[in-house]
Image (tube, rainbow, N blue to C red):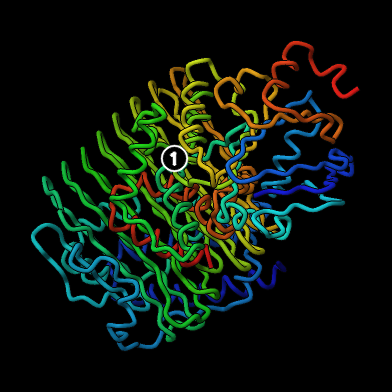
Amino acid sequence: MSELNEQNLIAHYASQHQHLLTSAEPDWLKFYRAKAFETFTENGIPTTAVEAWKYTQLRTWHKNKFHQHPKHAQLPELYELQLFSMLDEHCQEVIVLDGVLQTKISDNNAMQIMDFKHALKTEEPLLQSYLGQAVNHDEHPFVSLCDALAEQGIVVIVPENIVVDKPLHILYVSSKNSENCVNHLRNLIIVGKHSKVEIIEHFVDLHDVTYFTNHVTEVILEENASLSHYKLEQEGNKSFHIGGIHVKQNRGSDFCSNAVTISGHFSRHDIATTMVEESANCTLNGLYFTHNQQHVDYHTTIHHDAPHCHSSSVYKGILTDKSSSVFNGKVVVKHGAQKTASKQENHNLLLSESCEANSKPELEIYTDDVKCAHGATTGQLDEEALFFLQSRGLALSKARRMLIRAFANDVFNQMPSSIVRDYCQRYLEMAAYE
Amino acid sequence: MLNIENLHASVDGKSILKGLNLNIKPGEIHAIMGPNGAGKSTLANVLSGRDGYEVTQGSINFKGQSLLDMNIDIRAREGLFLAFQYPVEIPGVSNMSFLKAAMNAKRRHREQTEMDAMDFLSLIKTKAKQLQLNEEMLYRAVNEGFSGGEKKRNEVLQMLMLEPCLSILDETDSGLDIDALQIVAQGVNSLRANNRSFLVITHYQRLLNYIVPDYVHVLADGKIIKSGNKELALELEESGYVGVGS
């Protein structure tokens, strides 16, 4: 990347940022945005010389100058969305079209769901105290960019002592109006003490156009709160997606993250959680299926800041064609975080000669009484098993499918929600076994 | 059933089978014995169609068709079955679901209707019981965490379910204690019929006390050097392979 190019891009985003500073937003938010943008410009756009971006080239992303504010789009016909609406009566569904929440403010007693602008009006003190608690601008350049620029997003507030029985399905739809546009989405999820909720963030596109999604989902889990989070990436083969879930976990809270890439073009996902108080628990499951020239990068970061916390993480990749993947799983056990238990695994299945899986589990331990393990494997389908299955009468394609499914099921079986599991399995079968 | 003529086969360019002839008629049990490296497992692998075994000469006729022209799965659907010497573990694939898929692949091939789930379940339970296999194993992943004996019994379970017309048992007795050997043999014998044949490959005569062969062949250096009835196996047990055929 030439310097001119980078300067150009930063100038491009600076003008978008300037526009916001003259808006009617409260001063504290303008200040927050200004700080975020300052951090972004200081650190610059990451190159592969930066460790966290070593295997992910932003070169093709650079070629595109994405504009903000897509034209207003009509809500797609229901039948167009039905394809992605796995969940019908089983859950509450809201649609975010080209970055804009379509549902009117939804308050179903169990929780409040509203767009960011609305939340600024009605919940400003809450926003002011929570926004930015769980994110780190220095470590995540695109979080700084999002915080500097995002006007859209969703705020979900679950009060104390509530078990939300229906999962919330947030369907992010990109229409053709998103072409050459960027959607910066700044989401905030606050789960109150002793409450429990399931949230599915689902990214789809309808028309295979080039667009860029940059989202930050910040999550605060109060004492003993529990969140099962799903992120499904099911985008087209020209999409750019950089997104992160950044979680702060208080005492006794439980965070279960399930990330599935079914389709896409270029994506980088950060899943970062910090267990700031004792007895918190986190489980990170992930499955990525990549094809064509797709590139998927999963970075997970688990900070054990307090004693008696547990974490476990299993990520699996299935790669075909000329696609590539990155898994970088980092566990940091802080000084004093005694009795930490942590394990993480990454396994990759290579189905073609020219795909590439990069895998890097990292462990940083600054205390002594801990139990930590990690492991990674990369390989092909077991030839012996394929021969065995064929020798019992199964066609080669069927035998392959059976072994791929078995590999993926390891992750699916960890998912608490059978609805999401079934949905993902169905689409993966369609995508992977053609 | 099976007619092998002048079979030459090599592995990695190394010639292993050097002109093997064998004719198995429906209802017959043939045993092939021989020292290590004689080509016993190569024969089993060539018959089942495993990659890496190149047939350089000769022909194999199976039920009137050329076996070598068939894919691995087609051979199986036509009724050929190999009980593996080293059964493979397949994590994540349940015994039950794989066997059901295999049964139905075979039934479709024969233009039969697929088997109903309940019928399948009751059939497999009966067969498992016959082999004294714990029912819980049906739901486990194929051979995962099974003991050596359990793996071999699981092979025979598949054989009983698929009802092949030609079963090849590749050293099925290796690693079995005497109790397990008897269970396996009973399972095999229960399948005996005048339209089914068996090719039992073994190192030791012991198995042949329980699965009594009609013919015994001695394979050495890629050829059958001597054939006889079941008495031949006893002779071999006493005198060893040294000197046979000379």
Q: Where is residue A82 in the image (x, y as percent from the top left)?
A: 30, 76
Query: Toward the viewer: A396 or A337?
Result: A396
| A32 left or right of B165 in image | left
Q: Where is residue A152 in the image (x, y as percent from the top left)?
A: 33, 71
Q: Can residue A33 be seen in this view?
A: no
The chain ID associated with circle 1 is A
**Looking at the image, which residue is at 77% across and 25% down?**
B34
Q: Helix, strand, or loop for circle 1? A: strand
**Looking at the image, which residue is at 79% across and 12% down?**
B239
Query: Toward the viewer: B104 or B26?
Result: B26
| A427 left or right of B44 in image | left
Q: What residue type is labelled 1?
A: Ser
| A374 left or right of A255 in image | right
| Residue A292: quarter of image | bottom right
Seen in the picture, residue B151 relative to A270 is either above or below; the reply is above
Please, which residue is most extreme toward the top here? B238
Please, which residue is most extreme toward the right here? B246
Residue designated by label 1: A313
Quadrant where the N terminus of chain A is found in the figure: bottom right
**Looking at the image, which residue is at 34% across and 88% down?**
A72
| Residue B235: quarter of image | top right
Seen in the picture, residue B237 relative to B145 is either above or below; the reply is above
Q: Where is residue B166 in the image (x, y as percent from the top left)?
A: 59, 45
Query: Toward the viewer: A39 or A76?
Result: A76
Seen in the picture, residue B198 relative to A102 is either above or below; the reply is above
Q: Position of residue A76 (x, y in %)?
A: 32, 85
